[in-house]
DNA sequence: CTCAAATAATTCAACCAATAAACAAATCCG
DNA sequence: CGGATTTGTTTATTGGTTGAATTATTTGAG
């Protein structure tokens, strides 16, 4: 008999959930909250929060800040903060003309950053991944010197990626069916790390999500490089789709009988708002983008659109044209406006998002990170 | 300080979750499972399942079937099934040319069904809702005679609805800012029921979800009436969007400089695949639908599309044209096919989905239904 | 300078829910 | 009739949260 849906909850799941809740409360807090403040904020009792915080400190995820600010009568509170020397994430990116790696600690600070510029299309996938492996090993060595322990690695690729890390196709790299996850796992320095591979726009969207921390926003991140990709964040969660291939906005039709696209169709957005086309005619790029984005808003009722990649520098140039189409074509435009803004992270968005994805995994399930917590 | 995200989990939440798990396991099971079978399926122990099942029987949600089928050695199993006289859902629908109400019990069986044909555009919203209230009261009376207790009501409306039940605009009814939820709550026979209001396509999608019970499918339901709406189901959950206005596929642009639409834009899908346009040119309707659906698939990586409403009868006529566009315009068409199928529920889909939404609420949180379970 | 008030954090008994293992019930088969 | 087998229940145990009491550390008043 098939397990219908969901899985049983045992007491340990309760603990795991509440550990994550406490950790996230600290992470999303503007100041350094005390145990009592966390209790008030979460609804847990002070006793429970104390026990959970002890475990998180023991596990190296939280630190207690000794100097307590005076705030009135009573015993001063001991502030809590994410441990800067706790688990860190290794973010990797491979793109047309560069390789990059970075180490981001639990607090979100970028501790190391390495970029190697070179045209990857001239290399075989194996050679490119080997080179990336060397960069990753270098980043890990630097992290180790800093006393950081890596919790995992994530790689951003401009292409279609399956959940188990197989790159089915990355047109601009010229890749097809490359098992990037396996290649990276074979690098000795990474052999003991869980390695995830994901689409570049998806991870960049996660990077923007962290920058916009706190709430649980719904937004679309659009990345305009040679191709155009999008990451869809719904209620604070990245939506990947059934096979992990969501966000292919570059091949949404904007002019049904328009320019032929290398995908075989006609009138794909990419042919009007890709890097080359945008340079040739920015107004047309904006109009085409507006048409495609209006479709997204009509379908998903998204109220925030973030333009990243190559769109961020030219944002002011594109904005009026996009907004005109949105006003015209979004059914609910008068009832509720759509916010358009440039990405806050620059070219590093995908790499940062990759590293963030790793530490997000730790934050969402701290019990799994430290054996001592379970 | 703001509660960051999520809420604490206490022991009672564990029980609530596992109660729902057991109930859903019975609901999604093809046969009448025994306690032992549920234990094997869910991973809970037989002792725990026994205790939970006792509570669910006590609360009137499950019944034990005495006649046990012989299946080999050992003590015969006592089959369990959803209680047909447990809580039921009242589904309501208001559309251009009819009002409808139905009562669906916990097992999903339609126990009562009332339809009143009349052009609602000739009535004021107040008069139409009053008439619907009478129909609802009649349905409730019939349910009471059957010994059914209503758990709530849900109303399907062809328009934009806010989460608190305000109909912002329903173009084909000529409605604007009508508080449908409040109007129904004022009906004496419904005063003690929770009343939800939702978009017609959303609820119809939920109806299809139940018909396709068991898994946690991702699909798009498209309803082609005078206007065109869509319900988006992701991983077994209806996606409503930030304001509840998702699925407005009728106003996705298919021909940017095409026919003017009453929304003010040009080239909306509705102008090419709405009821009138489809009657005039089915091939054009199919092509336009294919273009818009390809956009959805590219964006959301959805692998199943269900055509309902007016599209269901003409499905075979439309299919080739739609599939041709999908093959051409979906980037991942070669990697993974998109399934196109007609809706299994007919014109009743939205009303059925509304009733299903109510009993879904009970199934998802049985502890809240019966005070005895807490 | 001492003591009361206030606030933070910990300790401890009680409780709730799931678990594991033993036990009882009901049937089949030799 | 008796062992094998499977279902369902009982009982002691464990893990985790709760609530109340307790300890810790500060401010402020007399």
Image (cartoon, coloured by chain):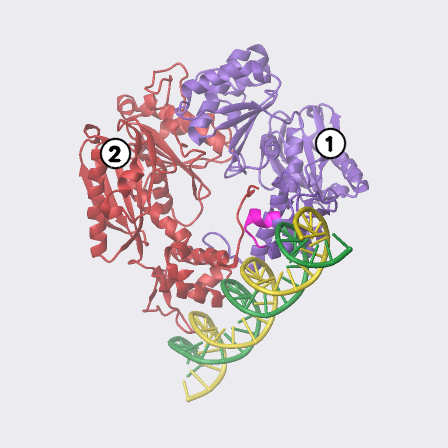
Chain colours: A purple, B red, C green, D yellow
The part of the chain drawn in magenta is: A37-45
Question: Which mark is in front, 1 or 2?
Answer: 2
B61 displayed left or right of B188: right
- Label 2, on which residue? B95
Look at the numbered disc 1 and give the secondary structure of its residue: helix
- Label 1, on which residue? A127
Percent of width and height locating residue B120: 21, 31
Q: Is residue B295 magenta?
A: no
A232 or A27: nearer the viewer: A27
- Give the quadrant of residue A262: top right
Q: Which mark is residue B8?
A: none
Residue in view at x 30 percent, y 44 percent = B352
Residue in view at x 44 percent, y 61 percent = B38
A184 or B205: nearer the viewer: B205
Callout 2 environment at 10 Å: few (<14), some (14 to 19), or many (20+)?
many
Q: In which quadrant is the C terminus of chain B drawn?
A: bottom left
Of all residues, the one furthest to the right in this rendering is A145
Percent of width and height locating residue A124: 70, 29
- Give the quadrant of residue A191: top right
Q: How many marks?
A: 2
Look at the numbered disc 2 and give the secondary structure of its residue: strand
């Amino acid at each position: 008999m098939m397990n219908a849906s969901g899985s049983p909850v045992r007491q340990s799941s309760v603990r795991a959930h509440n550990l994550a809740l406490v950790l996230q409360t600290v992470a999303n807090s503007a100041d350094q909250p005390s145990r009592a403040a966390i209790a008030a904020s979460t609804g847990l009792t002070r006793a429970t929060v104390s026990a959970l915080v002890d475990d998180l400190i023991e596990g190296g995820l939280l630190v207690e800040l000794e100097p307590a600010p005076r705030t009135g009568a009573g015993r001063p509170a001991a502030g809590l903060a994410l441990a800067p020397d706790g688990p860190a994430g290794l973010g990797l990116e491979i793109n047309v003309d560069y390789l990059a790696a970075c180490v981001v600690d639990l607090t979100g600070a970028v501790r190391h950053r390495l970029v190697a510029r070179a045209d990857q299309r001239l290399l075989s996938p194996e050679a490119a991944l080997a080179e990336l492996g060397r960069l990753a090993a270098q980043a890990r060595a630097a992290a180790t010197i800093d006393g950081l322990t890596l919790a995992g690695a994530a790689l951003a690729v401009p292409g279609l990626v399956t959940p188990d890390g197989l790159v089915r196709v990355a047109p601009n790299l010229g890749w097809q069916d490359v098992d990037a996850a396996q290649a990276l796992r074979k690098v000795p320095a990474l052999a003991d790390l869980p390695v995830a591979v994901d689409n570049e726009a998806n991870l960049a969207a996660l990077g923007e999500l962290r920058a916009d921390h706190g709430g649980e926003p719904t937004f679309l991140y659009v990345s305009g490089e040679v191709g155009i990709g999008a990451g869809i964040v719904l209620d604070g969660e990245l939506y990947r789709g059934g096979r992990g291939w969501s966000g292919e906005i570059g091949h949404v039709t904007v002019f049904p009988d328009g320019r032929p696209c290398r995908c075989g169709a006609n009138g794909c957005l990419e042919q009007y708002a890709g890097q080359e086309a945008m340079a040739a005619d920015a107004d047309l790029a904006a109009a085409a983008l507006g048409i495609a984005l209006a479709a997204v808003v009509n379908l998903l009722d998204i109220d925030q659109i973030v333009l990243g990649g190559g769109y961020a520098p030219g944002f002011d140039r594109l904005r009026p044209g996009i907004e005109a189409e949105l006003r015209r074509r979004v059914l609910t435009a008068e009832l509720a406006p759509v916010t358009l803004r440039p990405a806050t992270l620059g070219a590093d968005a995908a790499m940062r998002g990759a590293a963030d994805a790793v530490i997000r995994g730790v934050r969402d399930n701290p019990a799994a990170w430290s054996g001592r917590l379970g």
